[in-house]
Amino acid sequence: MIYKYRITLKQQLMLLWQPIVVYISVIIIWIYFLNYPFCNDALYVMCGFLFFFDTVPALILHIQYLIKNRRTLLFIDEANRTITYENPKKKAENIQFSDINCLEYYVSNVRNTGIYSFCRYRYCKIILKNGEEFVITCLMVNDIKNTLELLLHLKSEEKLKIMCFI
């Protein structure tokens, strides 16, 4: 079976829903449960704090991942044990599973606690024996670590970062 991966709107929304829900929740709690008026300096300070320390890093990561894998297609053919990586910058490359040296999985050491939006951004580097590298981001593949390990029959090396900039 051949598996096809690319950036989709659904995958992007799965990553971007959290900051939206957090802002809506803060405003609902602020107005409904605390009975504070909507126009209040403390609300603006709280939302500004959330925006600069949570949303901005997530948006930077999202844009960086979008640029890295824009118009990239990844085909994994399990039967023939090949990967086809198509990118506008590179011609389509057919890679045998045996040509893969290692699979590096970059994840935030903040972990996915549900508090920080940027901690759900992660990526994998497929490093070939000839030194060439391919980056696959979470905008292309949901549950990137388990999916690639299962399909490529490789164990990934986990690399921790505070924020997973490429």
Image (tube, helix red, strand yellow):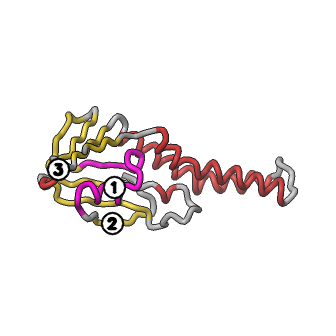
Residue type, mark 1 in image: Thr
Q: Which picture quadrant has residue 2? A: top left
Q: Which residue is mark 3?
A: 81
Checking the image for residue 39, the label placed there is: none
Residue 139 part of the magenta segment: yes
Of labels 2 and 3, earlier in sequence is 3
Between 79 and 151, the residue placed more toward the observer is: 79
Point 58% across, 48% down: residue = 17
Q: In this rendering, would 96 be left or right of 149? A: left
Gap in Å between the C-alphas at discs 2 and 3? Answer: 23 Å
> Label 2 near label 1: C-beta < 8 Å?
no
Gap in Å between the C-alphas at discs 1 and 3? Answer: 15 Å
Q: In this rendering, would 36 be left or right of 13? A: right
Q: Which residue is mark 1?
A: 147
Numbered range of the magenta stretch = 134-154
Residue type, mark 3 in image: Arg
Depth check, mark 1 against mark 2: the one in front is 1
Point 15% across, 47% down: residue = 80
Q: In this rendering, would 130 be left or right of 122? A: left
Of labels 1 and 3, earlier in sequence is 3
Between 113 and 81, the residue placed more toward the observer is: 81
Q: Secondary structure at mark 3?
A: loop
Between 146 and 16, the residue placed more toward the observer is: 146
Q: Position of residue 43 (x, y in %)?
A: 77, 54
Q: Which residue is mark 2?
A: 158
Gap in Å between the C-alphas at discs 1 and 2? Answer: 14 Å
